[in-house]
Amino acid sequence: MISSEIIRREFPAVFEKTYLNAGALSIAPQRAIAAMRRMTEIAGGQVEAGSGQIWGEFDTMLRTARQNAAWLINAEESEIALVESTTRGMSIAADTIPLSQGDRVLFCDMEYPAVALPWIQKQQTTGIEIDVVPNRRGEVHVEDFAGRITPRTKVVAVSSVQWTSGFRCDLAAFSRLCRDRGIFLVVDAVQQLGAIPLDVKATPADFIACGGHKWLNTPFGMGFLYVSREIMPRLKPCTAGLMGTVPPEGGWGPYLESPNARAVRQYSFIDEARRFEVGGTTNFGGAGALGASLSLLRELGKENIADHIRRLTDQLTTRFQDAGLDVITGTNPERRAGIVTFDLGSPERNRELAAALERERIIASVRYSAGVGGVRISCHFYNSSADVDHLLESTESFVRTVAHSG
C-alpha cells in the first residue's frame, strides 16, 4: 500500500487539485525540491565551503542518482549515464551506434518525435534508411516488426509505452527478436519507468532512455540513459570531457593545482556509460533532485507503486466502458502502464472536455500521433480512487451536457 502520510508530506499540491497528468509533467516531491534548493544555495554563495568540498558534494549527487537509477531497472551503476532528457538519450544512441549507408532502422508510425528525429537526422547525413511500421489502432506488435526486418536492419527503436494510446508493448518479445537477429534495441521508457517495473536482466535491451520529469517526478533537465555493458566496446565515442577520463593519481583537483598540469597529455577514457555524459560541468541540481525522487520510489517500492497504478487504471477503464466511452487504451493490464486514453469522437470535443476539466481543477491532456489519441489520463502513485471518481463524475456530466445541447 502507498502511505497516505508520505503523499501528504511529499506532495501537498495533490490536495489542491486533481492532477492526472504525469505523462506530460509530474509533480516533484518535497525532497527533490529541497535538493534543487541546495543547489541554489551553493550558487548564491550561501554555503561556507571551499570549491573542493563543493565538488565533492556534486560528485555525491551524481553518484547517488546513478545508483538509484541502476536500482530502478536492476542494472549496474557502470551502465548508467545521467543525461538531460529522453531526447538526449535517444540521440546518443543514434550518434554512437556504428551505421553505414543503406543500414536500416525500424520504428512505429505512432512514436513520439524524439524517437524518430535522431534517425531522420542521421538519414540526412549518412544515408541510412528508415522503415516505419504502422500501428494497429494504438497498439505496437512485435510480429509487425519481424515481418519488416531485412539483412540490413541494424536498429529497432521503440517506446515501451506509447505516449498517446498508453499501450505497453511486449518488450520481452522485442528483446528476443533483436537478440536473435543481432539488432540493436533502443527503448524510450519515459512513459513506463516510475510506474511499471522494468528489469534489464530479465528483459535485455541495448539502450534505455528516460527523462526524469514525468513518472520519476523530477524537475526538468535530468534523466538517465542505460547502456548495456555488452555493447559499449562496439560504440563510437560521443563526447570528450575531463570527467569522462580516468583521473590521475590523487584526482583532478590536486593535478590541476600543479604547475605540471597540461591540456595535451595521454588520457584514458573510462569504459562506463558515464563516458556518454557531458563530461564537464553538468546539471548537478537536477542530479540531486533525480537521486532524491528515486529515493522516494525505493522507499515506496516498485511493486507497491505498480499495484496502486493498476488499481486506478482498472477503475478508469471499467467506468469509462460502462459509460459507453471509446477507450483507446486496451483493457489487458499487461499491456497498460499508467496512461488511459479515451475519445469523445473528435479532437474538438476532446479539447473542450480537457478545458472543462481544468476549470474544475482536474488536469489532464489531449494527445495524438498518427491519428491515434484523445483525452489522456495519467494515474500515478500520488493519485487516489477519489481522484478517479472526481474525473469520472465530471466527464459524465460533460457528456450529458453535450448530449442535451445537441
Image (cartoon, rainbow, N blue to C red):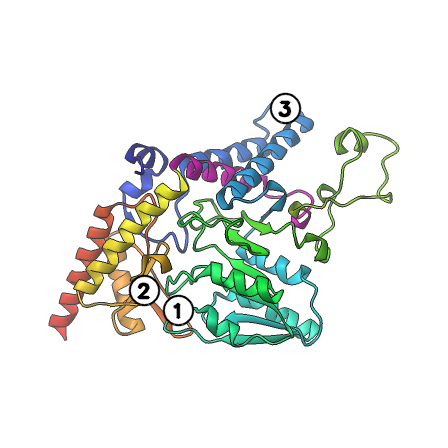
Which numbered disc flags the more N-terminal residue, 1 or 3?
Answer: 3
The image shows a total of numbered marks equal to 3
**Label 1 SS:** loop
Mark drawn on residue 139? 1
* Residue lying at the far front of the rendered structure: 180
Q: Is 18 contained in the magenta span?
A: no
Percent of width and height locating residue 87: 55, 58
Query: Residue 276, relative to residue 375: is it above or below?
Result: above
Identify the residue position indicated by label 3 in the image.
Answer: 49
**Label 3 SS:** loop
Could you tell me which quadrant the N terminus lies in? Answer: top left
Within the image, what quadrant is residue 120 found in? Answer: bottom right
- Left or right: 192, with 66 as reference point: left
Identify the residue position indicated by label 2 in the image.
Answer: 330
Q: Give the residue type that dot 2 points to.
A: Gly
Q: Give the residue type that dot 3 points to.
A: Ala
Q: Name the residue at 23% across, 47% down.
A: 385
Which numbered disc flags the more N-terminal residue, 2 or 3?
Answer: 3
What's the CA distance linking mark 1 and mark 3? Answer: 54 Å
* Residue 362 visible in the shown view: no
Classed neighbour count for the residue bearing mark 2: other residues with Cα under 10 Å, few (<14), some (14–19), many (≥20)? some
Classed neighbour count for the residue bearing mark 1: other residues with Cα under 10 Å, few (<14), some (14–19), many (≥20)? many
User: Which region is colored magenta?
Assistant: 275-300
Percent of width and height locating residue 321: 21, 64
Q: Name the residue at 22% across, 62% down.
A: 320
**Label 2 SS:** loop
